[in-house]
């Protein structure tokens, strides 16, 4: 009998497997329908020996020391700051938009102070910022919105930014300085030997058994377990009883080129041309030296593996119905990006898993305390009974 059956060997499932096995001595079976561990963060050496990310570029960044320290038990790190260029009006300019983006795009020589004035002069008044379009036009105006955001978002989501929740473009900052890093988090680094190597260590505890190429429907009625942790799509768990939660998918087209370097930076975004949104060159991310180079193109799709929960009010309302069912399902815990239908980064999923583990740990401590108290009470009752017996034998009342 397993203490826990964990569905999905991505960050959510693997972190919980590791904690439960190593800290609470639980016996864990973790399964995945794919033929590998590491979920969407899976990386591998391709046929040319170049380390690539199968499901698109995964860049680790976090402001949480707890998350970074926790993962550091399973990997060394390679310092890495991510940089992106966008192809706009025939030029490659820094993305997120910063001082250099504006100066290069318009052939200007503005200072940081002046560019802030420029943004204010072009920004549109929006009474209430609700949509992705509102976020951008209220900060940098319509022209920059059209050049950098509108078409990219339409390609990525298959919808106009005016139909999408503000959270989508709120993730992309606008800067009046020359900082061209994509992220500004305190910790920015890549696992030195890759994500899959880190997951191998996470899952190496002898209490953890791994079963790949297995959909949970195939084994859930056959393998005995006490509790389940589910990290797949929450609507699938409940047989889509309220209908399908919409996800956006991607097709990844990988390519290896007979040249050492292809792009001027790790990622180039194409907001306006091509059917793909961006191209990534992996060697920037991994630091690998190799005479050839591997890149990936991302083509957004309506159908396919569920990658991005679509942030719209009606989808959030549909998810709340599933969440209610999830909360009412005893012994099953829903965690991770698909199970909570939220656009989480890797560090946020690790934090979510560690928070759930803390709950298990507290429950286990409380249970142990109750058992200790019950044992003491039993002992006292036995002692009292013993005293009574010897008193009645002595004929006293
Ligand atoms: C293209 C792309 C780029 C990204 N880039 C970044 C980035 O740069 N930085 C960042 O921090 N985050 C990034 N993310 C987000 C990151 O991938 C997620 O935060 C992380 O993978 C979530 O982990 P998870 O365990 O919740 O889900 P997943 O990694 O999706 O793992 C869930 C697992 O469950 C398995 N599963 C599902 N259903 C079943 C079933 N019925 N039976 C058995 N197994 C099942 C799946 O096969 C999967 O392996 C990116 C995501 C995508 C799609």
Image (cartoon, helix red, strand yellow):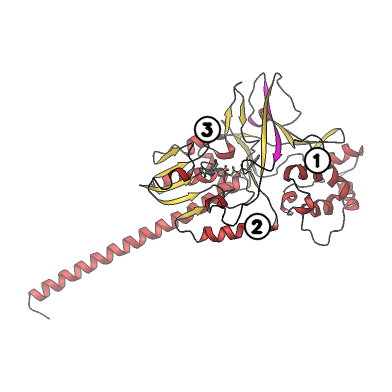
Q: Which mark is residue 285?
A: none
Q: CA distance from mark 1 to mark 3?
A: 35 Å
Is residue 301 highlighted in magenta? Answer: yes
Mark sitting earlier along the chain (1/3): 1
Residue drawn where x is 24% and y is 67% of the image: 380
Residue bearing the label numbered 1? 178
Residue drawn where x is 61% and y is 41% of the image: 305
Q: Secondary structure at mark 3?
A: helix
Is residue 196 highlighted in magenta? Answer: no
Q: Which mark is residue 197?
A: 3
Q: Secondary structure at mark 2?
A: helix
Examine the rendering and report whether any part of residue 191 can be seen. Answer: yes
Q: Secondary structure at mark 1?
A: loop
142 vs 250, left or right, is right
Between 14 and 243, the residue placed more toward the observer is 243
Please provide percent x and percent y for residue 64.
60, 48
Seen from this angle, which residue lies furthest left? 394
Q: Which mark is residue 316?
A: 2
Mark sitting earlier along the chain (3/2): 3
**Mark 1 residue crowding within 10 angstroms, few (<14) / some (14–19) / many (20+):** some
Mark sitting earlier along the chain (2/1): 1
Between 158 and 263, the residue placed more toward the observer is 158
Of circles 3 and 2, the one toward us is: 2
**Mark 2 residue crowding within 10 angstroms, few (<14) / some (14–19) / many (20+):** some
User: Is 192 placed above or below 182 here?
Assistant: above
Q: Is mark 1 within 8 Å of ligand 1?
A: no
Which residue range is magenta in the image? Answer: 285-306
Please provide percent x and percent y for residue 9.
51, 41
């Amino acid at each position: 009998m397993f203490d826990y059956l964990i569905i999905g060997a991505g960050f959510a499932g693997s972190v919980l497997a590791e904690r439960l096995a190593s800290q609470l001595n639980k016996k864990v079976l973790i399964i995945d329908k794919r033929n590998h561990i590491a979920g969407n963060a899976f990386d591998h050496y391709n046929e040319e020996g170049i380390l690539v990310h199968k499901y698109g570029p995964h860049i680790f960044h976090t402001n949480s020391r707890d998350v970074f320290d926790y993962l550091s038990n399973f990997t060394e790190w390679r310092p890495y700051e991510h940089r992106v260029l966008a192809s706009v009006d025939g030029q490659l300019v820094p993305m997120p938009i910063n001082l250099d983006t504006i100066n290069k795009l318009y052939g200007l020589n503005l200072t940081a102070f002046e560019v802030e004035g420029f943004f204010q002069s072009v920004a549109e008044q929006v009474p209430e910022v609700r949509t992705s379009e509102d976020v951008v036009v209220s900060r940098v105006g319509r022209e920059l919105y059209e050049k950098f955001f509108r078409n990219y978002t339409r390609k990525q989501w298959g919808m106009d930014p005016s139909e999408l929740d503000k959270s989508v473009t709120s993730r992309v900052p606008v800067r009046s300085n020359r900082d061209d890093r994509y992220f500004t988090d305190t910790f920015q680094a890549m696992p030195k030997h890759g994500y899959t190597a880190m997951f191998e260590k996470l899952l190496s505890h002898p209490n953890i058994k791994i079963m790949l190429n297995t959909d949970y429907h195939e084994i859930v009625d056959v393998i005995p377990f006490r509790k389940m942790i589910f990290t797949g799509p929450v609507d699938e768990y409940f047989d889509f009883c309220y209908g399908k939660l919409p996800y956006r998918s991607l097709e990844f087209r990988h390519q290896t080129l007979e040249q050492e370097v292809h792009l001027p930076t790790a990622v180039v975004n194409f907001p306006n041309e091509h059917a793909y949104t961006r191209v990534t060159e992996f060697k920037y991310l991994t630091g690998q030296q190799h005479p050839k180079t591997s890149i990936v193109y991302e083509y957004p799709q309506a159908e396919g593996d569920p990658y991005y929960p679509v942030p719209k009010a009606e989808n959030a309302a549909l998810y709340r119905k599933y969440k209610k069912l999830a909360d009412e399902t005893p012994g099953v815990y829903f965690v991770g990006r698909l199970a909570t239908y939220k656009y989480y980064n890797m560090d946020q999923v690790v934090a979510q898993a560690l928070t759930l583990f803390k709950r298990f740990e507290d429950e286990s401590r409380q249970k142990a305390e109750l058992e200790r108290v019950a044992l003491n009470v039993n002992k006292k009752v036995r002692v009292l009974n013993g005293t009574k017996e010897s008193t009645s034998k002595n004929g006293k009342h």
